């Protein structure tokens, strides 16, 4: 399991210096942005993605203007809660078994910290952060983040699925089943969570049809 640097809040608590002017994970102010990925200006998003989040970057193959880490860094400084870029950052770091990609300004976890610091009401950003920690094997740290994500985005299938997986691994089956049913009601396509709970004898795998509001 990787050993990551402490998160911003923890490091600041450990540092003796009221003189420390900026958080460990960096100031969010940026020459271009920061912008909310949920409601982007199409032109601003295009300018960033056409140069720094090309198909090769998204797939974690290679950078476009420099290193892969540098292009992801640019994207995530302009759009801190760019969930697709966060997912790529996590996937590449896990594959390379590194806490920081070459060319990136910060440790991988910092980009998740920056995302939720920028938009604390973005459930998908909290879910991405929790999923990254979960994939590192840090389930106890991941669970509160996944729980918060589900509270903020209760109608998001992916958020519910990831929360259900984490609860299942912690053997909190009632909550795992609750999130599984919600995820599948919302149309989540993967059956891993369903199989896990059915094999454990905690669920029959059946999902009630979503309720449809009556039309006037």
Image (tube, rainbow, N blue to C red):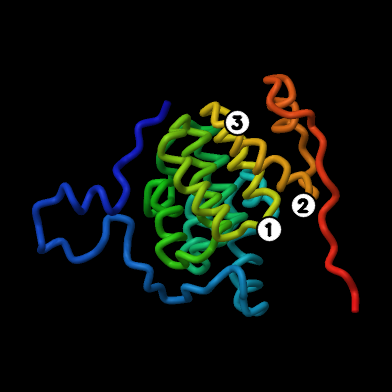
Residue 206 coordinates in the image, percent (x, y): 82, 36
**Distance of label 1 from label 3 (alpha carbons):** 20 Å
Is the residue 202 above or below the residue 113 in the image? above
Quadrant containing the N terminus is top left
Task: Residue 181 in the image: state x and y as whole percent.
Answer: 73, 42
x and y, in percent, of residue 178 in the image: 66, 42
Residue drawn at point x = 14 percent, y = 50 percent: 15
Badge 3: residue crowd in 10 Å (few <14, some 14–19, many ≥20): some
Residue 183, compared with residue 136, is above or below; it is below
Whether residue 21 sits left or right of residue 180 in the image: it is left
Judge whether residue 66 can be spotted in this image: no
Report, in whole angstroms, how far the alpha carbon at label 2 lies from the one at label 1.
Answer: 7 Å
> Which corner quadrant of the image does residue 98 belong to?
top left
Marks 2 and 1: CB-CB under 8 Å?
Answer: yes
Name the residue: 43% across, 33% down.
Answer: 138
* Percent coordinates x, y for residue 155 in the rendering: 68, 58
User: Which residue is the site of mark 1?
Assistant: 155
Q: Mark 2 points at which residue?
A: 186
């Amino acid at each position: 399991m990787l050993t990551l640097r402490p998160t911003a809040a923890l490091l600041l608590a450990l540092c003796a210096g009221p003189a420390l002017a900026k958080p460990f994970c960096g100031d969010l102010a940026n020459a271009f942005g920061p912008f909310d990925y949920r409601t982007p200006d199409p032109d601003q998003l295009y300018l960033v993605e056409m140069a720094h989040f090309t198909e090769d970057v998204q797939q974690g193959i290679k950078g476009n203007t420099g290193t892969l880490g540098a292009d992801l860094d640019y994207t995530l400084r302009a759009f801190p809660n760019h969930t697709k870029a966060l997912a790529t950052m996590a996937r590449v770091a896990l594959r390379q078994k590194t806490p920081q990609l070459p060319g990136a300004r910060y440790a991988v976890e910092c980009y998740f910290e920056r995302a939720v610091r920028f938009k604390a009401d973005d459930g998908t950003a909290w879910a991405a952060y929790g999923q990254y920690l979960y994939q590192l094997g840090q389930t106890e740290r991941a669970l509160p983040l996944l729980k918060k994500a589900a509270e903020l985005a209760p109608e998001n299938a992916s958020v519910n699925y990831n929360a259900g997986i984490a609860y299942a691994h912690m053997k909190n089956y009632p909550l795992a089943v609750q999130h599984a049913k919600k995820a599948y009601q919302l149309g989540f396509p993967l059956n891993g969570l369903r199989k896990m709970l059915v094999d454990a004898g905690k669920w029959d795998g059946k999902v009630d049809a979503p309720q449809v509001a009556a039309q006037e």
